[in-house]
């Protein structure tokens, strides 16, 4: 045996089973970075997963010395197998050499590691026998199953089959061998001979009675199992049935992860049954047994291209399962699914936003210390979970990395803890639209008016489209903002963002401007006219009739008729306005043809066929006009959104706002 150097001897002395687990895990997920074709990746994957699986079982074998000894011995043997496979490739690749060194450290220090108390224990759920397990409900729920440790699994890069060698276009045909020339007479003779042989073959054979009797006696008896198989097919093993069922459920989870995101024009609350089915499928998969989970992971290996929906499903599924081994498996998947693909990056972040595992933040914070894409992904996900501190988000925005600057800016509105408002206000002078928009939103949610004041200034300068300044002014501006809109309309060309903002602002003084724009062929004016008047004019019904007392601009809150295809005929809208404008007041604020009140925003949050963007604007308007800061996220599960709307409805601040006014209730 080669003599140990001081460094390796020290490593051996410090090695414990938790450290061995981390080293083997690093090699397993690092297989994705191996480019040397001589390295047997699949064999290595089998050895390493077997070693890790046995190691988890050893760490979980509390008080059972026989099981501990058996599992540690299996883990050692399979680690040695992995080391032999790595060395057999004789690779000079730096990545492979690093893997050899890591596995060699584990094998050399194994004997000492087994007798040393692990520095980090592996916590597995151990519910009491009388505890009734919680199934998934309205929102993602952590499932605590009494189970064996999960078998580790990774997603190895897809291997393309070798290309078929096709003949070159235009190549000359192969030459036929020379021989005796073929004549018509010889062909006729061959045809006659073939017909004679065919007749001989077609003639039925007449076996003797003796042969038929012997053949009948030689046939074996028919067994009942053969009859049953012939009638009903092959009997499936229980494991095959469970795996097929789990695979079907998993494909449903992947599909529903996309279906739960509403398209523009969808009623978001109608997607709750989709989410209920998604969560029920998670229960169904776990009901088949956790042994199916590695098999589901390997489905991603079979995909010829990255699959964002399956990535979402496999991460979400493991994130709903209690136990350190489940969290380790989530990290293995994150390191091997291919986050460098933008769609996979987004899907993985979305999945980790909703997983209920209590160790998720700790995992993300470890990634926050890593360089490159891992850190960017961690910032995105921590920001969406509302777990990035305010000082951390500001530090990223003031950093040098363009990608981290944008991710930090996106995290500002939901940043946790104190947020330095002075430093945040400095971002309003940034040249990047997304940074400025995020700063305005963050300041608004912290009840600071400085962001809205900057939006006013941008609108007056004719830059209403920059960072959506016109929309921020519309949802948080007062009577004085009217002159800012007039200044923006005086500049040319007028941005569609400014036109949309006129509908949110609520002053009927701009109806004539919008009608003139519609007469000029600009159809974007229709949306603003509808938000102001709620007329819902169509080409089929250009002159709707109203009951007495329900005429436009006379009553209180009333939802507008929902028309999917509004008329774009300027004459139709002009005629309606001329007929009803006498009841309108230019000094009041209107929405959908009546005096604006917070009820309009609550209706749009809850019942309207509104996009996520429109619902976020309605929420921002509630914050600005009422001063309450109850959270709301249109990307969250429907049950949580409904609970958030209920909190807003019960909020006393929302009931204290006068209808038809432009209040601003910010205190800083």
Image: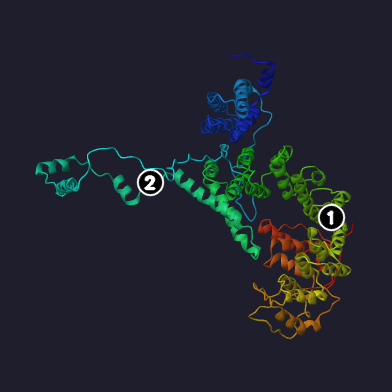
Quadrant location of the N terminus in the rendered image: top right
Q: Residue at the spot x=79%, y=69% of the render?
A: 502
On residue 443, the disc is 1
The answer to whether residue 593 of the structure is visible from this angle is: no
Residue 641 x %, y %: 70, 59
Tag 2 secondary structure? loop
Task: Locate residue 366 relative to residue 2 in the image: left or right.
Answer: right
Eyeballing the image, is 329 above or below 571?
Answer: above
**Circles 2, 1 touching at the beta carbon (< 8 Å):** no
Q: Residues within 10 Å of mark 1 (few under 14, many from 20)?
A: many
Coloring scheme used:
rainbow
Which of 572/478 is in front? 572
Residue 264, percent from left and from top:
66, 63
Callout 1: SS: helix
Q: Which residue is mark 2?
A: 235
For the residues labelled 2 and 1, the Cα–Cα distance comes to: 65 Å
Q: Residue furthest bottom?
A: 548
Q: Is residue 207 left or right of residue 219?
A: left
- Figure check: 348 above or below 115: below
In the rendered image, residue 511, in percent from the top left (x then y), is placed at 79, 76
- Residue ID at (79%, 77%): 512
Within the image, what quadrant is residue 148 found in? top right
Q: Few, some or many C-alpha atoms within 10 Å of disc 2 (few <14, some 14-19, many ≥20)?
A: few
Q: Is residue 359 left or right of residue 201?
A: right
| Of the image marks 2 and 1, the number of the one nearer the N terminus | 2
Left or right of 185 in this view: 563: right
Question: Could you tell me which quadrant the C terminus lies in?
Answer: bottom right
- Mark linked to residue 48: none
Q: Quadrant of residue 643?
A: bottom right
């Amino acid at each position: 045996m080669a003599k140990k150097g001081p460094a390796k001897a020290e490593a051996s002395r410090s090695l414990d089973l938790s450290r061995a687990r981390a080293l083997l895990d690093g090699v397993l997920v690092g297989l994705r970075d191996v480019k040397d074709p001589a390295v047997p990746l699949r064999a290595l994957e089998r050895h390493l997963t077997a070693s890790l699986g046995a190691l988890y079982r050893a760490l979980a074998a509390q008080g059972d010395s026989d099981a501990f000894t058996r599992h540690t011995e299996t883990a050692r043997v399979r680690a040695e197998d992995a080391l032999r496979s790595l060395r057999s490739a004789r690779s000079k690749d730096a990545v492979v050499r690093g893997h050899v060194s890591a596995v060699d450290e584990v094998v050399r220090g194994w004997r000492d590691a087994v007798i040393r108390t692990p520095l980090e224990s592996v916590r597995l759920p151990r519910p009491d026998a009388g505890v009734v397990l919680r199934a998934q409900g309205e929102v993602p729920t952590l499932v605590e199953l009494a189970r064996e440790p999960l078998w580790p699994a990774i997603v190895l890069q897809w291997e393309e089959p070798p290309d078929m060698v096709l003949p070159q276009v235009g190549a000359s045909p192969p030459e036929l061998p020379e021989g005796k020339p073929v004549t018509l007479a010889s062909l006729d003779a061959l045809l006659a001979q073939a017909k004679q042989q065919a007749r001989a073959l077609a003639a039925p054979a007449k076996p003797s009675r003796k042969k038929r009797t012997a053949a009948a006696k030689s046939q074996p008896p028919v067994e009942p199992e053969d009859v049953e198989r012939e009638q009903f097919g092959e009997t499936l093993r229980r494991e095959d049935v469970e795996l097929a069922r789990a695979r079907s459920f998993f494909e449903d989870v992947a599909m529903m992860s996309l279906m739960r995101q509403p398209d523009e024009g969808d009623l978001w609350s109608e997607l709750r049954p989709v989410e209920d089915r998604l969560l029920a499928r998670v229960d169904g998969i776990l009901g088949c047994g956790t042994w199916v989970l590695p098999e589901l992971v390997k489905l991603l290996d079979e995909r010829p291209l990255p699959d964002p929906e399956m990535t979402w499903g496999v991460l979400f599924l493991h994130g709903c399962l209690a136990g350190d081994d489940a969290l380790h498996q989530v990290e293995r998947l994150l390191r091997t699914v291919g986050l460098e693909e933008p769609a996979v990056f987004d899907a993985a972040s979305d999945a980790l936003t909703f997983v209920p595992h209590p160790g998720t933040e700790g995992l993300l914070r470890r990634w926050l210390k890593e360089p490159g894409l891992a850190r960017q992904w961690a910032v995105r996900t921590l920001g969406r979970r509302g777990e990035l501190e305010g000082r951390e988000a500001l530090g990223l925005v003031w950093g040098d990395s363009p990608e981290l600057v944008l991710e930090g800016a996106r995290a500002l509105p939901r940043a946790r803890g104190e947020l330095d408002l002075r430093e945040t206000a400095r971002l309003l002078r940034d040249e990047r639209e997304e940074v400025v928009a995020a700063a305005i939103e963050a300041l608004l949610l912290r009840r600071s008016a400085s962001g809205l004041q900057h939006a006013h200034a941008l609108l007056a300068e004719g830059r209403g489209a920059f960072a959506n300044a016109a929309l921020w002014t519309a949802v948080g501006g007062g009577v004085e903002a009217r002159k800012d809109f007039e200044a923006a309309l005086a500049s040319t060309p007028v941005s569609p963002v400014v036109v949309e903002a006129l509908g949110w602002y609520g002053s009927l003084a701009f109806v004539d401007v919008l009608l003139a724009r519609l007469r000029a062929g600009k159809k974007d004016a229709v949306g603003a006219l509808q938000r102001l008047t709620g007329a819902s004019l169509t080409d089929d019904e250009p002159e709707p009739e109203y009951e007495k007392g329900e005429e436009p601009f006379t009553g209180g809150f009333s939802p507008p008729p929902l028309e999917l295809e509004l008329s774009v005929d300027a004459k139709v809208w002009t005629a309606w306005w001329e007929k009803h404008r006498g009841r309108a007041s230019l000094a009041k604020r209107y929405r959908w043809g009546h005096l604006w009140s917070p009820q309009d925003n609550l209706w749009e949050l809850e019942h309207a066929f509104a996009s996520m963007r429109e619902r976020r604007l309605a929420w921002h308007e509630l914050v600005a006009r009422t001063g309450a800061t109850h959270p709301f996220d249109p990307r969250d599960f429907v049950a949580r959104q409904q609970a958030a709307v209920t909190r807003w409805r019960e909020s006393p601040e929302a009931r204290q706002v006068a209808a038809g006014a432009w209040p601003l209730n910010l205190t800083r």
